Image: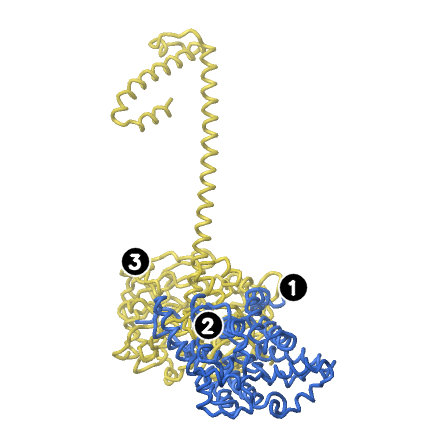
Chain colours: A yellow, B blue
Amino acid sequence: MQLFKFKGGVKPDSNKTPSLQTPIGMAPLPALLVVPLHQSIGGMPNPLVKAGDRVFKGQRIGNADKWISAAVHAPTSGTVLAVEERLAAHPSGLTTLSVLIAVDGDDEWIERTAVDYQALAPEAVREILRDAGVVGLGGAVFPSHAKLTAAQSVPIEDLVINGAECEPFMTCDDLLMRERAEDIVRGAGIFRDLLAAKRVLIGIEDNKPQAVAAMQEAVEACGENFSVVAVPTRYPAGGAKQLIRVLTGKEVPASKRSPEMGVQCFNVATAYTAWRTIAHGEPVLSRIVTLTGNVAEPGNWEVLLGTPLKDFVALGKPGADTSGYLMGGPMMGFELPSLDVPVVKASNCIIAGSLALFPPLPPEMPCIRCGACAEVCPHELQPFEMYWFARARNFGKTQEYKIFDCIECGCCSYVCPSRIPLVQYFRFAKSEIWSREREKNISEAAKARYELRNERDAREQAEKAERVARAAAAKAAEKKPLPGAAAADAPAADAEAAKKALIAAAIERARVQREQSETALDAGGAETQRTQRDET
Amino acid sequence: MNFTTPPYLSQNVSVQRVMLQVLAALLPGIFAYAWLIGPAIVVQLAIATVVSLLAEACMLKVLRKPLLLFLGDGSAIVTAWLIALSFPPLGPWWLVVVGCLFAIVIAKHLYGGLGQNPFNPAMVAFAVCIVSFPALMSQWPPVDLKAGFEDQLAIIIGHPRLLDAMSGATPLDALKTALKLGEGKVSVTAVMADANTFGRVAGQGWEWVSAAYLAGGLWLWRRKIISWHLPASFIAGIVLLSGALWLWQPGQFANPVFHLFSGASMLGAFFIVTDPVSGCTTSRGKLIFGLSAGALTYVIRVFGGYPDGVAFAVLLLNICVPLIDLYTQPPIFGEKSKP
């Protein structure tokens, strides 16, 4: 098969060997699970349980909110202790609504039902996947069902299954492919059927020969015609757009989604969970997590979602000089604010960091425009130009240099001889642009509200003037006043008299009101005044 | 932890390492120079290095920038060496001092320091000195000069009586003058028959210095410190123009090989036009920059009044850099097939 190249990229030391020595281990049940409801891109799932509820393994505890969202489930059986804000696995250190489950240790399942997806309408299958919480497990956690609709105008030519795993240190996909290849292939088959894709291409970096062999074998065992392709090892070959480029030659720009170009891409672990959902009725309750870095026993574990990281990292016996933990790879991951956060669907890798492993960077120097960053940028941007303008807060210019095509892969920072944290500058510029957009939208909304209010005021004034004019006309028609006392007793048949009585009553009320408002003025009775006016 | 933003890995590279490799790549040229032309160049290099570092230190102090960090980056030494190598080796000591001060203080730091200067500092120094001291900047030692190191040192630290004996011209200048005096009747071959001034392809001795620069430059390219675009297009610029004129009138115009191995062609191709700070950054921009600088160099050295044209050619192109970069932005990933 003809392979294509993407420009740029870097080759950092892979550091994958230490965590590849042992098979995937099953992490023991923790005493407490903290399951965040928001574990995917999109809408915040609504909690379905409350404190005191007994939950079974696989029971849905959060319902998908709108289409772009995914359900969340109890990873094991137990009792809901609380539904409350807990620290999120996010660099910000912010909290997120989480379900706390006291684990009972029985690991008691809800009733599981396999479905024959081919007998169902595609729409129904997508709903099943959404309700099983199937999301992109490569780290982006985009709800998978939402990616399983082909663009209306373009048929899907190629379905790319991403097993490249280009981040250093990370081996969770490698081991998953080695040990559970058949389930991945069958999951890919579901995706192929839903998208009606013509070809299925499974891309794996050529530094994982065992995974390539296992996948090839599984494809044959399943009788599929998928191509398992070893792609050259070069970071970020596992970026969806880079892998699509390498396998199909197509370049998906930031302004387009890949289905518009007839391609769709899923991670191997995602395909695996899709198959478990359809064929076994098991929603996404756990994931494979690489635990490596400064630990005595690096390896991969199948970990229940919601397992506190404190419990999880203890499995690897971290070194005493561990100074922090990264979630994700060293190129695109982030430093965890604390070990109190739980394992979530996005946690593909936890790296215990030490000063020896990640020595502090020498001080930043000025940019010398050497262009090394532009040479390694897989999106062929000019990072030093964007840096220049981001620094000068000239955000319009950063957009002219296509800052939103930046995937923040970190290649530019990796090669910069001046050690400029370029990615940080780009994130800063992007968030500034977003917040300005938001502000603009807010001020536009405020302007619209203001104009609406002006309009309403004008309308009310016009109505009031009309009322006054009508009242004046009525007054002019009725010149002879009647005593107020007689008004109540006046015969109903006498319409004229009734009108007069009404007017008299109005005059009487006005008099009372005047008296009241005089007293109310001292007591600050603006409220009463308005109420009275409304009554009249 | 001490790390805050991804990526948490970085390649073992630094500005200092880049600059040190540039200096290392200059060494073959310096050895050839000292061996074939005269050891005085080592003295000039030393003066330039000391003055540049002192000027750099003073400016960093005045501008309150971290002294050791910037002094250690090696960029001032690169500038100093390029100045010393492009100035006449037997010029008075203060000539190089003036050049270095101008380069470091004005062309570099007053424009914002490392990474900010729009003009190549070494070429600014050359241009300033050749305009201010045209006679001194045009006096090059004849290759058959049999002065020992002590005499050469004496000339540098200022013995005017010896200076006259030193008056010479570069092979480029010698050819230009001879052809001019010959008024079309003297051919290039006849002029170059003078074995005292000319060697196999270009200036006696100088051709080997140029070859050594070429070797160092190729090493820089292999180390990926410089890309091929600038040297190749600069050389192409010289070759195209000189080749065309040579083919038209071989008697009156020297061949391209002569021009490549004369003057500062090789030094310029690999060490001067490749300055990233003041040069173009896009691939197409680099090609335009190199080609134009090469052609301009040829025009100035053959038809102009100065012994060589690299400095003015580079400075003129430095002015055009923002414009060239603006119009040569490459299409990005996914947007190449757009109309």
* Disc 3 to disc 2, C-alpha distance: 65 Å
Q: Which residue is identified by label 1?
A: B339
Q: Which residue is identified by label 2?
A: B103
Q: Which residue is identified by label 3?
A: A84
Q: Position of residue B255 (x, y in %)?
A: 67, 84
Tell me what residue is drawn at x 36 percent, y 14 percent. Answer: A507
Tell me what residue is drawn at x 45 percent, y 17 percent. Answer: A471
Q: Position of residue A499 (x, y in %)?
A: 43, 13
Q: Chain of mark 1?
A: B
The reply to whether label 3 and label 2 mark residues of one chain is no
Three-letter amino acid code of the residue under disc 2: Ala
Q: Position of residue A351 (x, y in %)?
A: 35, 75
* 3 vs 2, front mark: 2
Tell me what residue is drawn at x 55 percent, y 72 percent. Answer: A244
Of pointers 2 and 1, the one earlier in the residue sequence: 2
**A393 and B131: which one is in front?**
B131
Image-quadrant location for residue A58: bottom left
Three-letter amino acid code of the residue under disc 1: Pro
Q: Position of residue A481 (x, y in %)?
A: 40, 8
